[in-house]
Structures are given as structure tokens and as C-alpha cells.
Amino acid sequence: MDVALPQRLSIKEGWIGRILIAFMTLGFIALAAAAVAIGWITVRNRTYTAEILHTQDVRQAIATLQIEMEQSETARRGYVLTGQPLFATAYLRTAGKLEPAIQDLRHLTSDNRRQIDRLDLIEPRVAELRALRAQSMTLVAAGRIAEAQRRFMVDASVPLMRGIRYRLQAMAAEEVRLLAIRSGRQQWTSMLFLSVAGAAAVLLAIVAILAILVIRRYTTDLAASRDSLRNLNETLEEQVAERTADLSRANEEIQRFAYIVSHDLRSPLVNVMGFTAELATAAAPLAELVDRAEAEAPHILTEDARLAAREDLPEAISFIRTSTQKMDRLINAILKLAREGRRTIAAERIEPAQLVDTIIGAMQHVIDDRGATVRVERPMPTIVTDRLALEQILSNLIENATKYLKPGRPGEIVVKGHTERNRVILSVIDNGRGIDPRDHQRVFDLFRRSGAQDQPGEGIGLAHVRALAYRLGGTIDVQSTLGDGATFRLNLPAIMTIQDAA
Amino acid sequence: MNDHKSVGIVMIEDDEGHARLIEKNIRRAGILNDIRHFTDGTTALDFLFNAADGPAKSGPAMILLDLNLPDMSGTDILTRIKAEGSPLKRTPVVVLTTTDDKVEIQRCYDLGCNVYITKPVNYESFAQAIRQLGLFLSVIQVPDAED
């Protein structure tokens, strides 16, 4: 379950989530584009509005010019007809505005060649008109009203005005045309603005919905993973306890099995041994009888009977004995392993160097007999584990190291230790006869031995060592080449935690 | 045995071979007491407590008990014999078994076992132990069931 968990969490962030995020990103890009478009459209719109206002201004200026022209004409005619000074002042007021009005118009239409052309035609005519008017005004002011009236009748002011009027109308028409174009443009940009804004609004809504979906999805996922994590957390202790109980049960079962098997095997063995002894006891008087028969009546003694009593029977009994004794040792070994598995272990702080010293001290005479030396490399890391188990492991390894020497080479055994993270590695290194790499696993199996069978033993020690190492939460391995010594490495947790509930 | 009532030996042992070996060695030690042999717990208990000629009703006895029996554990029988109010409470019990498990030995003594002998595969020491038991039998005073 602990393996499946990260996988399950990552699947939740899978393709649907990625598609949603892609859509959201697209939505945001589109929104940004819409914002840029709206900005551009607004700028355009402002330009078009300014143009329209400008056109209105031009139209206003054209109208002003025309009105001033008409008003000044009206004032002139009134003055010519009546001689009233009131008209003279009115004329002066309006006539003075004509020239600024033209200049104003020229300024406003400076960007339009056609209007300027028209204005170029209007301007001299206005000047001509003004000259004519000024003449009339001067004549009337001088009292020569009749002359003024006569001249008025014949002068060219009416056609001039008509011409000016006509051209001003043309200018106005031009401006109307421009206004229509510009209004059209403005309308179009307004429409564009509206549609882009509408599209942006729709996009915004979509992005918002997508965002909500994504957020909801993540929230749901988070809630789900939080729940499953909490669930796992809550049941973790339970699961661990359950599995530990299972393992302990299985272990107990095996221990009990080994115990019963070895126990029940012993029972018949007692009989075999007992009755073999009885047989030996019974054979003794028979052998005696054969001896006596040979001495007193050799003719009744057959060769077969003599062989049976003197050789066959003792030989058979001897083989049965050695076999049963061996079988007894094997059964005892299984029993010992089974019992070791049932022993409660207790963690305590141990200085391995001291422990090794004690072990060497206890077997010093054996080591000396075998002509070996054992050296402890200090310092060795402190370890928290079961003292008896560690002692048995190390004592077995050191015993083996001094036992399987290479003939003609004095044994040199080194015991050392180092820490690897939270593990302690204790090594027993010898220069003995070594172990064939094919046998590296086999030597740890019960009743299996490697190399020349020239040393006493049942193949129990290393099996026991491995069982103990496992029990302490550790492992054991061997590195060796044949004829070149062996290194047994015991890998133990620096601080043992007792796992079995048994 | 002198003026004492003869002590009957009740042997509860499912293995015929073991029973024979034990008997042989007891006889070799010069013990001639009557030996009753049972191969299962049920009939043995029936004899111990109910039989007219059983130890509960008449005569002192001594029990040789194997712990591994087909129908019940030897410790169950030991518990019954040594229970409070049992007529056989004072009857000596010698436990004879293949187990040399410390815990089991302790448990047997706790239940009131008087002697515990493991059956070693080394026959000589076994025979020795049985013979010594025979000597022991010849000197002990076994209390009467009726007190």
C-alpha cells in the first residue's frame, strides 16, 4: 500500500488536470489579447472622435465665415439705403471678423488640400468684396449716398457673393462627406469595441468557470489524498501490529514445529540407543561362549558363528552407535536453534571490543593450540543489541576462523568494526583456507559444510549465527576466495528495536 | 521391603521400548516391586484413582510419568495427582521425559513433581540414572494413601 500511494496521488493530477490548466492558460492569453485589442480600439476611437470634432469645428468655421459675410453685406446695404451710422458700426464689427474667420478656416483645413484650394479661391473674392464694400461705406460716410447706391447697383458684389456662397457650400458639403466617413469609422470601432468586449466577457466567464473547476478538482484531490493519508496513518499502527502478529505467529509455528520434530525424533532414538546397548550387553556373553567353544570344542564352531560374534556384531553395533550419536547431535542442534528462537532478547549497550576480548580470553587455550593469533582493531563502534546473541555470533565466527586454517600458515585473525549510517558492521577477517565462492550461501545452511571435511563439526555454527543475526535485525555475509582467507561481515542495526511480539 | 507394605510402581509411558528399558534397568538395580505399565493417560488415571487395587484405594505407590502421551500431556496427570484434596497428593512422582527444556522442568517441579529425569540418548547415563532411581526406591518411605 505504501508503494501504491504516491502513484495514486500522481494519477489524480493526470490528464484532465493538465487539459484544464492548458485551457485556462489559453483563456488567460485570449483575455490578454482582448485587453490589448480593447486598448488599441479605444485609441482608434479617440482619434476618430477627435476627427469628427475637427470636422464639426470646420463646419462651424465655414458657417461663421458665411454668416459674417452675409451680416456685413446686410449692414452695408442698410447703410447704403439709410445712411444710418448704426449700420456703419455693425458693418465695421462684422467686416473685421471676416479675415480672422478665413484664417481660422485655413488653419483648420490645413490638412485638406481640396478645402485649401477652395479657400484659395474664396479668399481673393472676399478681399474683392471687402474692397467694394469699403468703397460704398466711404461714399455713404462722405454723404454721397446716391453715388453709393448707383455703384451698388452695378458693382460685382452680388455675383461675388454668390460665388463665395457656392464655394462655401461646397466646402460644407466636403465636410459633411468627411463627417459621414468618420462617423462610419467611429461606429465601426464602437461595434468592434463592443464585440471584443463581449468576447472578452465570455472568455472571462469561461476562464472563471475553468479556474473554479481546476480549483475544485485540486481541492477535492487534496481532500481525498488528505483523507487517504489520514486513513493510512490511522491504520498504519494497526497494519504493522497485524503483520508483526502474523510474522510472529508464523515464526512461532516454525519454532514449535522444529521443537516437536526434534523432540519426537529423540524418543525413538532413545530406544535405538537403549536396545543397541542391550544388544552389546547380550553380545558379550555370546562372544565369551564362542571363545570357550573355540578352546574346548573347536569342531562345533563354524566360521560364520565366529565371524558373527567377533566381527559382525561388534561392527554393526558400533555403526548403529556412531550414527545414532550423530543423529542425536543433529536433533540437539535443531532443538537448540528452535530454543534460541524462543528466547526473549533484550537490548543493551555493548562495547564490542570488550566483548571480543572476553571471547578470546575464554578460548585462549584453543587459539594457542591451533597456533593462531587474534587481534582486535580499536576503536570499535558501540552497539545496542542482545549481549548473549552477539557473543554467540562472534564466538562462533572467531572459533571458525581459528579452526579452518591453511596448513603451513599461522592463523592471523583480525576483528574490527565500523559504522555505516545507522548500521554497525563487525568483520572477522582470517587468513585461513577460505571458502569456495559456490559455497558462500551454503555454509550458512543447517548441516552444510564446505571444503575438506577434516575438522569435527556438524555444520551448525554458521546456521546458528545467521539465525541469531536475523533475530537481531541484522544480516551476515562472507567474502572469500579459496585458499586466501575469508571475511565474515556482520551487519547489525546500531540500535536494535525489538520487533517480535512473541 | 522389610515390614513396609510393598510399594507398587505405576509407570505411565506410551513408548513400549522406553518402558521395557526402564523396567530392565530397575530390575537390574535389584528392585523387585510390582510394576504396572500404562501407555495412555486415561487408563492410567482411571487405575490411579478408581481401581480397587490402585494406589488411591489401597497401598502406597510411586509413579513414573512420561510427559508426552498420546491422549493428554503428562503435566495434566501431574496436576491431577498433586491437586489439593487428591488422595495421591503425597505419592512421589518421577517425571521421565526426553525434554530437557528448563521451563518445562521448572513447571513440573512447580506442579509438585518429586524427581525429574531426562532420558538421554546416551544409554549408559540413562541406565545409570534408572539404577540410581532403583536405589532411591529401596530407601524411601512412601506414605500410605490413607495416611
Image (cartoon, coloured by chain):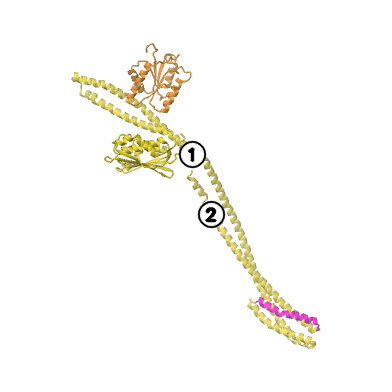
Chain colours: A yellow, B orange
User: Which structural element holds mark 2?
Assistant: helix
- Which residue does the image show at 67% across and 82% down from the upper left? A121
Image coordinates of residue B58 in percent, x first then y, are: 43, 13
* Chain of the residue displaying label 2: A
Helix, strand or loop status at disc 1 = helix
> What amino acid is labelled 2 in the image?
Ile
User: Is residue A397 shown above or below A202?
Assistant: above
**Residue A210 sits inside the magenta stretch:** no
The answer to which of marks 2 and 1 sits earlier in the sequence is 2
Name the residue beneath numbered marker 2: A19
**In the image, residue B117 lies at what x, y percent?**
38, 23
The kind of residue tagged 1 is Val
Does residue A110 appear to the left or right of B96 in the view shown? right
The crowding category of the residue bearing disc 1, from other C-alpha atoms within 10 Å (few below 14, some 14 to 19, many at least 20), is few
Residue identifier under label 1: A240
Q: Quadrant for residue A398, please give it.
A: top left
* Horizontal side of residue B21 vs B80, given as left or right: left
The residues colored magenta run A82-109
**Which image quarter: residue A102?**
bottom right
Q: Position of residue A378 (x, y in %)?
A: 38, 42
- Asked if badge 2 and badge 1 are on a common chain, one would say yes
Instruction: Say if the magenta span includes residue A90.
Output: yes
Asked whether residue A265 is in view, the answer is: yes
